[in-house]
Image (cartoon, rainbow, N blue to C red):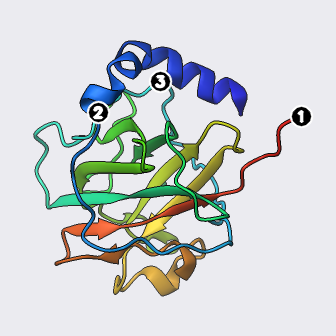
Amino acid sequence: MLKYRRTILQASAGLLIAGPMLAQRHVLAQTPECTDNPTPRQIEGPYYTPQTPRRSNLTDGLPGEILLLEGRVLSTTCQPIPNAIVDLWSCDAKGEYDNAGFKLRGHQITDAQGRFRFETLMPGSYGNSSFRRTPHLHVKVQGPGTPLLTTQLYFPDQPLNQRDGFFSPALLVKWTRNQSQAVFDFVLPVQAKG
Ligand SMILES: [Fe+2]
């Protein structure tokens, strides 16, 4: 897991230096919820690509419905975790992953309040008639001094949610204004020093 942070941080080294200047000014639409339960883990799946670009807009001009995802990375004591990596990837509206490049892939580093914000596309479903994945986002999250969290996020009211064995209500995003703006707060345990 430390190797993961080191690889991502090396890719972002130049931008990290400019981090304070690039601090996100966006104000969250809702007060984030806090819980002492860490966000549940889920499988990575077969389509992760390492060393993603650091960026907030992942859409690359692809067709589909714009999806804004924002939130915070918090500790189990409800403290914001700055400088956490949030690495997001998903399929396109047709259910296809870009496994050759970085379309719909990228990472953010949380600001002083632990915030992140992505602009991506609403993912489609994929699979076949016997096994079909409900729309979901894949994500890896790691803060300084936290374990690496690999998980997936889901969307309310998707007909396939109840038929997807990976679906978890604990990983549902919340719509903030309409079905294009979603919020999710990740909660990570902070490892004791020494
Ligand atoms: Fe997937």
Query: Which x, y percent locates residue 151?
Result: 57, 57
Picture quadrant of residue 158: bottom left
Q: Considering only vertical position in the picture, is 92 above or below 82?
A: below
Label of residue 42 in the image? none
Q: Does 6 sit left or right of 84 as displayed?
A: right
Give 104 or 56, whichever is nearer the viewer: 56
- Look at discs 3 and 2 and give the one toward the viewer: 2
Give 58 or 69, whichever is nearer the viewer: 69
Residue bearing the label numbered 3: 51
Residue bearing the label numbered 2: 55
Badge 3 or badge 1: first in the primary sequence: 3
Quadrant occupied by the C terminus: top right
- Look at discs 3 and 1 and give the one toward the viewer: 1
Residue bearing the label numbered 1: 194
Query: Which x, y percent locates residue 146?
Result: 69, 44
Q: Amino acid at mark 3?
A: Gln
Picture quadrant of residue 174: bottom left
Q: Residue at x 33, y 37 (%)?
A: 98
Query: Which x, y percent locates residue 57?
Result: 21, 41
- Look at discs 2 and 1 and give the one toward the viewer: 1
